[in-house]
Image (spheres, grey):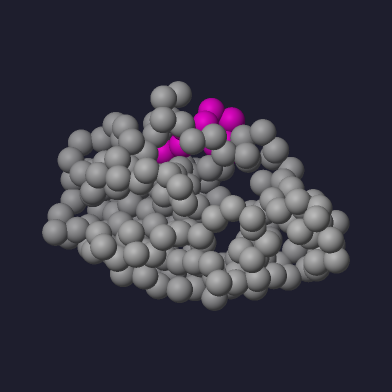
Amino acid sequence: MKDYIHFYGSDFSELFAIERSAMDRQGKVIDFLNSNLPSGRILDIGAGNGFTASRLLGPDRQVICVEPSDTMPDFSLPLTWVQATAETLPFHQGYFDAAYSTWAYFLAGVNKEPGLKQASRVVRPGGRLIIVDNAGEDEFSSFASDNIVSDSQWYLDRGFECHIIETAFDFKTLQDAEKLMTAFFGEESMAGNVRLSYQYRVAAYVKSLD
């Protein structure tokens, strides 16, 4: 699919399951989204397997999942799925009450402007955009040799507010921690550094549309 940013979870489901289980196990990011998203029709951009979207559903809130991969979605979840990319959202102007994206598309080193333009188009005036990504300056991100931290100034320059969520990667077993952290950061970086928990800071960028 054109403009499809390939995600490792499409090929390594076991690793992705470990990541989803360990990342923010306390659910602080879900709690933030629940508190800051309105009722109505919500768009999840790059929904992955639907983990986040399924936890944001409510009697007065519908979540529509956009995901470019045909292997990531968990179709057993009570969600509506649309195969598309962030740059080509197949919805008319102002269709949604809000949109959010968690660790998808709006990443370090990616040209985020086309996706932001599309998200702003499909959310109604007065609606809200929320982008969740790595905040950096934490234990987890310190092992990365490449930049995996969001550019906060990029968001601030475009009218977003930044909210920092202090959380952690909490693994069930040391074996799980070693599998994921070594896959992410390499054996050399993780030698002697494998443990059950790592400090992790998340940035939630929030903007109300005019």
Q: Is residue 17 left or right of residue 54?
A: right
The total number of labels drawn is 0
Which residue appears at 85% of the width and 56% of the height?
Answer: 175
Image quadrant where residue 1 sits: top left
Which residue appears at 53% of the width and 28% of the height?
Answer: 70
One can see residue 200 in this view: yes
- Residue 15 percent location from the top left of the image: 72, 46
Image quadrant where residue 197 sits: bottom right
Say if the magenta span includes residue 71.
yes
Compared with 195, 52 (above or below) is above
Magenta highlight: main SS = loop
Q: Is residue 163 left or right of residue 186?
A: left
Compared with 177, 43 (above or below) is above
Which residue appears at 46% of the width and 31% of the height?
Answer: 4
Q: Is residue 68 left or right of residue 188?
A: left
Point out the residue furthest to the top here: 1
One can see residue 62 in this view: no
Say if the magenta span includes residue 72.
yes
- Residue 179 percent location from the top left of the image: 79, 51
Which residue appears at 63% of the width and 40% of the height?
Answer: 9
Using the image as rendered, state which of residue 10 and residue 109 is in the foreground: 109
Using the image as rendered, state which of residue 44 and residue 210 is in the foreground: 210
- Residue 177 percent location from the top left of the image: 78, 59
- Residue 108 percent location from the top left of the image: 47, 51
Quadrant into which the C terminus falls? bottom left
Segment tinted magenta in the rendering: 66-74
